[in-house]
Image (cartoon, rainbow, N blue to C red):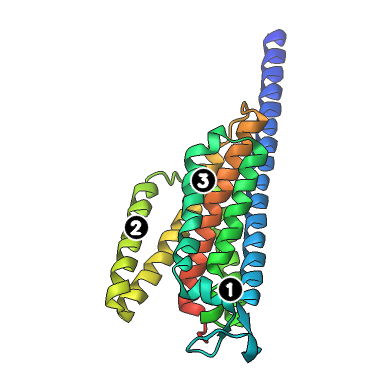
Amino acid sequence: MADLRNYQARAAAAGTRADAGIDEGLRAYMIKVYNLMALGLAITGVAALGTVSLATTSDPSQAVATLGNGHMLTSLGAALYGSALRWVVMLAPLGFVMFMSFRIHTLSMPAAQATFWAFAALMGISLSSIFLVYTAQSIVQTFFITATAFGALSLWGYTTKRDLTGWGSFLIMGVFGLIIAMIVNIFLQSSALQFAVSAIGVLVFAGLTAYDTQKIKEMYLESDSTLVAGRKAIMGALRLYLDFINLFLFMLQFLGNRE
């Protein structure tokens, strides 16, 4: 009996150590995901500010075009915001997302990280136009409100015992519905439809933040090699990055003060 009790005690202790090892590895993995996402957002912010500073001017002698709200554009600004180049800038980040989704398993860690950084920079160039539409103060305020909401939603997705798998198909359908509605509204220019799209967009990406966090957590395997774990962390960071950016943009339509 004593031997049996000793064996059970040793087995319980081994199980505790194994669980602690898994928890430590999972925490390190999730911290890497969040750090990559945060660095991606920082690159996006720097790229957006750098682009808009080069694209606009306060010197009339350097301006080649003027927007309706008084912003004067340099030749770079006229090319980025007033020519066919703007479509290239808008669609380039989508190309990077598709490339990473299909090729991440064949990329080395340096190549995967470089692709993510390039994507974040291109996204910043694409988003620089918001500084021509909204005041800088409202953009900053909305960013911090979004960061607070995102943090709370992601924390809930990480800690909840509820299985969010059932949310997946519903939320993806919501994303496709949003895309269709936004395309339709390009032609309709309906303020009511725009309000509905913004409200639904906030709800959809709030749900995706929690859902994706749980799925990223479930992707972790203690047996993964360093390379595989690194690729998973980059793709996890990409998913959360996209959730944050979309949540921010839809909230900006509610909270942002237009120029």
Q: Position of residue 78 (x, y in %)?
A: 52, 77
In what element is the residue under mark 3? Answer: helix
Residue at (47, 61) in percent of width and height: 88
Query: Position of 114 compared to 163: left or right?
Result: right
In what element is the residue under mark 2? Answer: helix
- In the image, residue 53 above or below residue 221: below
Label located before the other in sequence (3 or 2): 2
The answer to whether residue 160 is seen in the rendering is no
Q: Position of residue 28 (x, y in %)?
A: 69, 41
CA gap between label 1 and label 2 equals 36 Å
Name which quarter of the figure residue 77 lies in.
bottom right
Q: Is 228 or 69 nearer to us in this picture?
A: 69
Q: How packed is label 2: few (under 14 Cα within 10 Å), some, or many (20 or more)?
A: some
Q: How packed is label 1: few (under 14 Cα within 10 Å), some, or many (20 or more)?
A: some
Q: Position of residue 194 (x, y in %)?
A: 35, 75
Residue at (60, 47) in percent of width and height: 115
Q: Which residue is mark 1?
A: 76
- Disc 2 marks which amino acid? Gly
CA gap between label 3 and label 2 equals 19 Å
**Mark 1 or mark 3, which is nearer to you?**
1
CA gap between label 1 and label 3 equals 42 Å
- Disc 1 marks which amino acid? Leu
Q: Which residue is mark 3?
A: 214
